[in-house]
Amino acid sequence: MRAPDAQLRAGHIPADLIPHGTDPRTVVVVHHQPQARDYTGPIMLTLVISAGAVGVLMTLCLLMQVTAQTAATVAAAAPAGVGLSVSLRKGGRK
């Protein structure tokens, strides 16, 4: 038996549950119906996780757009001649 109450659910009544002097053939076991499962919690959890993922994705997209726009503005404003240059000299005459 897998569940602790599997014997009771199968209709097998342990002897210690039957009162003394009672005929075991006259004992009736009444089971209650389990309640239907409530799916509100898992559905709400899924919606919250999805909304959070969309929020993070939208924030990353906005950040990348602002970064690209700033880089384009800086690149357009900088003159083309500005930069690091290295001058090379030939060795002197001996």
Image (tube, rainbow, N blue to C red):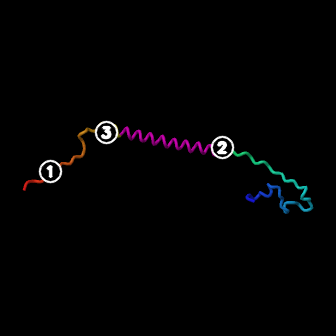
Magenta range: 42-70
Q: Earlier in the sequence, mark 2 or mark 1?
A: 2
Neighbour tally class for label 2: few under 14, some 14-19, many 20 plus, Cα within 10 Å:
few
The kind of secondary structure element at disc 2 is helix
* Mark 2 or 1, closer to the camera: 1
Instruction: Return the mark for residue 40.
Output: 2
Q: Residue at coordinates 92% horizontally, 61% vertically from top-left?
A: 21
Disc 2/disc 1 C-alpha distance (Å): 78 Å
Residue annotated with mark 3:
75
The kind of secondary structure element at disc 3 is helix
Query: In the rendered structure, are the residues bearing label 1 and label 3 in contact, judged by CB atoms less than 8 Å apart?
Result: no
Is 16 on the left or on the right of 77, as rendered? right
Residue annotated with mark 1:
89
Three-letter code, disc 1: Arg
Disc 1/disc 3 C-alpha distance (Å): 31 Å
Position of 42 relative to 7 (above/below):
above
* Magenta stretch, main secondary structure class: helix
Disc 2/disc 3 C-alpha distance (Å): 52 Å
Quadrant into which the N terminus falls: bottom right
